């Protein structure tokens, strides 16, 4: 992937630092700065090869061996892996996806895959699969279900089911590798947290689930304002998630003038 590294990422330190800060990878996860269109093109080329399954199997083995270590796959390798699944033969996708999701540990990897998985809803058992991930105790499995629901199931048929899943979420039991400000302070600061292999989030954990739910609700407000407001009047969601939802709604040009409640 070296030839695809963006010149600006390679040469401009300020740009590189800002890019990495936005992606916010866990310690040990390198970022090379490849652009999404370049990764998507590479993924399509790899998925079309006769040895595509061997390539994916190699990524699976590398992910298992390098988890939490210096030998971990890069952010771009994780992203291309997901993009390959979206470009693989229909008969292989669901099985490959089940093996991929447990290794997702970053919001950008998660959301890039989800947004490109237009095939998923047509698969038998797709919604049931998401319900299983909603019930997971792992942050990015829950975010995977949340963002996938927003991207591919946010319609009249599934909206009540999505709200039902949100009300069932127990944020206190969802484990996260990203610690919030209070946890960082309790551990003695950012350096101690990063040295332990944990990441840092700007809000309480599981921050990326909280933000994913807020994003989905803001999108629902744009599409189904009355239904969304009715749900929020009696939802079981924590107050901080509601505040994030209001912020997301105000940031979006589609809902900045729409009452969130």
Image: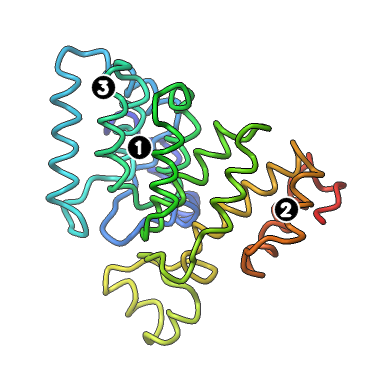
Number of the front mark, 2 or 3? 2
- First reached walking from the N terminus: tag 1 or tag 3: 1
Residue drawn 68% across and 42% down? 219
Number of the front mark, 1 or 2? 2
Q: Are the residues at dot 1 and dot 3 in contact (C-beta closer than 8 Å)?
A: no
In the displayed structure, does residue 162 sit left or right of residue 260?
left
State the CA–CA distance, disc 1 to disc 2.
Answer: 34 Å
Identify the element where label 3 is drawn.
helix
State the CA–CA distance, disc 2 to disc 3.
Answer: 37 Å
Image position of 173 with respect to 160: above or below: below
Residue drawn 12% across and 50% down? 65
- First reached walking from the N terminus: tag 2 or tag 3: 3
Find disc 1 in the rendering and name its residue.
79
In the displayed structure, does residue 137 sit left or right of residue 19?
left
Identify the element where label 2 is drawn.
helix
**Quadrant into which the C terminus falls:** bottom right
| Residue 126: image location, x then y, percent | 42, 32
Q: Tell me which corner region of the image, top left, top right, bottom left or bottom right, holds residue 255.
A: top right
Q: Are the residues at dot 2 and dot 3 in contact (C-beta closer than 8 Å)?
A: no
**Quadrant into which the N terminus falls:** top left
Relative depth, front residue between 216 and 224:
224
| Residue 214: image location, x then y, percent | 63, 54
Find disc 2 in the rendering and name its residue.
231
Image position of 70 with respect to 256: above or below: below
Residue drawn 46% across and 35% down? 127
């Amino acid at each position: 992937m070296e030839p695809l590294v963006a010149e600006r990422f390679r040469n401009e330190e300020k740009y590189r630092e800002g890019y990495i800060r936005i992606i916010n990878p866990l310690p040990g996860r390198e970022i090379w700065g490849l652009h999404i269109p370049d990764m998507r093109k590479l993924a399509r080329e790899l998925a079309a090869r006769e040895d595509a399954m061997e390539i994916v199997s190699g990524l699976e083995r590398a992910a298992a061996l390098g988890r939490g270590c210096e030998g971990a796959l890069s952010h771009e390798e994780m992203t291309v892996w997901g993009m390959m699944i979206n470009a693989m033969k229909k008969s292989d996708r669901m099985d490959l996806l089940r093996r991929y999701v447990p290794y997702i540990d970053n919001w950008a990897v998660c959301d890039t895959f989800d947004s490109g998985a237009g095939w998923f809803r047509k698969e038998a058992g797709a919604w049931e699969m998401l319900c299983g991930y909603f019930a997971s105790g792992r942050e990015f499995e829950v975010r995977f279900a949340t963002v996938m629901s927003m991207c591919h199931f946010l319609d009249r048929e599934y909206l009540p089911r999505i709200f039902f899943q949100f009300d069932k979420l127990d944020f206190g039991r969802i484990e996260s590798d990203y610690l919030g400000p209070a946890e960082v302070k309790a551990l003695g600061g950012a350096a101690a947290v990063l040295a332990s292999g944990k990441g840092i989030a700007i809000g309480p954990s599981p921050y990326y689930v909280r933000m994913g739910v807020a994003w989905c609700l803001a999108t629902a407000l744009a599409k189904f304002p009355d239904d969304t407001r009715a749900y929020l009047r009696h939802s079981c969601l924590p107050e901080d998630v509601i505040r994030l939802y209001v912020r997301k709604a105000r940031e979006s040009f589609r809902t900045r003038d729409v009452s969130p409640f």
